Image (cartoon, helix red, strand yellow):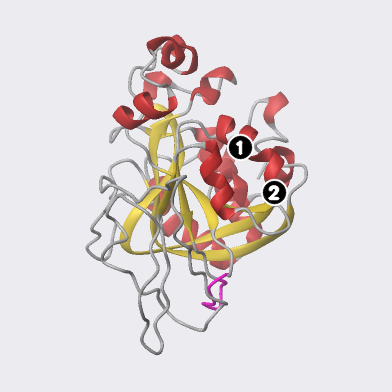
Amino acid sequence: MLSHACRTRAHLPFPTTSSSSSSSVLFLQPLPLSRPHFSPNLFARGRWRTPPSMSSGDIFCPYPLELIHESDFDKIVSSDGLVSVCGFGSLLSERSARSTFPELINFRIGKLSGFRRVFAHVAPIFFERGIAKPETKEISSLSVEPCDGESLIITIFEIPKSEIPSFIEREHEFRFLVVVPETINGLFYTNPAVLCARYSDEEYFQNRCKGNHEIFFQRYGRYGIQKIWHDDILPCRVYLRHCVLAAENLGDLDYNNFVDHTFLADRKTTIRDYLATTGSGIMEEEPPGPLKFRYGG
């Protein structure tokens, strides 16, 4: 259970990029600060902003910023043509990350403040692979959403700019946010990173499917899925086990953060509590033969 009040910002409008914007973005060198300083304008939809002045000890972090179009990713491509990506579920596994992004470099552990993990959306790939259990509602994959007071241990790595189109296609159901993660020691990274966050059904249909019912049918409808985001579904058993093992392989800090800061769709039940009650036995179940390597942590 949550030990403190958590005020989610999941439905607030995020700032978006503007291709015509000439505003510069300020990313500071890593500083030993405990928390970023948020501008009150960060959650107003509009152009990127830089503060007119900063007080001593403040750090201005222009995030979260939403990337809607492929061209928006150009805003966060580094000078050497790389994009930083945050992993919070299966991408906690370096083996999974490298199978998904063969050219990734600099795989490492970091921290992200102000977000929580939630098993709250249906993933069609679980239906494709035969590991979804719609009869028990064990069909959910993992996303993150803004939540005051929460902090996640994540992985961070870089991929070439050329992999952005396939990244967008593979993570089609997500909202792409720009965030500035920290090192475990609380230093802010110089470069921002992209994070796959919770979307809404309405925005997904309009933005990703272009309001086209046929596109939605090909991606979801053909599996009998009419709604993506829910508050009453449960994790896909094979996928949850994979994520827990991946976190465990990173160490005790990562494991404990995952099971205590990842929630069911009710936003109350932690994965630690779930595995000790209704989900007991999941960690002892082996994935189907052809998927043992893919979902083996």
Can the viewer see residue 66?
Answer: yes
Quadrant in the picture for residue 229: top left
Quadrant in the picture for residue 234: top left
Asked whether residue 142 is drawn in magenta, I would say no
Q: Residue furthest right?
A: 103
Asked whether residue 185 is drawn in magenta, I would say yes
Measured as percent of width and height from the top left, residue 249 is found at: 66, 56
How many dots with numbers? 2
In this figure, which residue is indicated by the disc labeled 2? 159
Please, is residue 279 above or below residue 88 in the view?
Answer: above
Can the viewer see residue 286?
Answer: no
- Residue 167's label in the rendered image is 1
Which secondary structure type mostly characterizes the magenta part of the structure?
Answer: loop
* Residue stretch in magenta: 183-189
Q: Amino acid at mark 1?
A: Phe
Q: Which badge, 2 or 1, is on the more N-terminal residue? A: 2
Question: Quarter of the image containing the C terminus?
Answer: top right
Measured as percent of width and height from the top left, residue 195 is found at: 50, 50
Determine whether, in the image, residue 118 is placed left or right of residue 127.
left
Between 115 and 120, the one lying in front of the other is 115
Please, is residue 288 above or below residue 54 in the view?
Answer: above
Measured as percent of width and height from the top left, residue 180 is found at: 50, 63
Residue depicted at x 60% and y 57% = 155
> Separation of disc 2 and disc 1 at Cα?
10 Å
Question: Could you tell me which secondary element the residue under label 2 belongs to?
Answer: strand
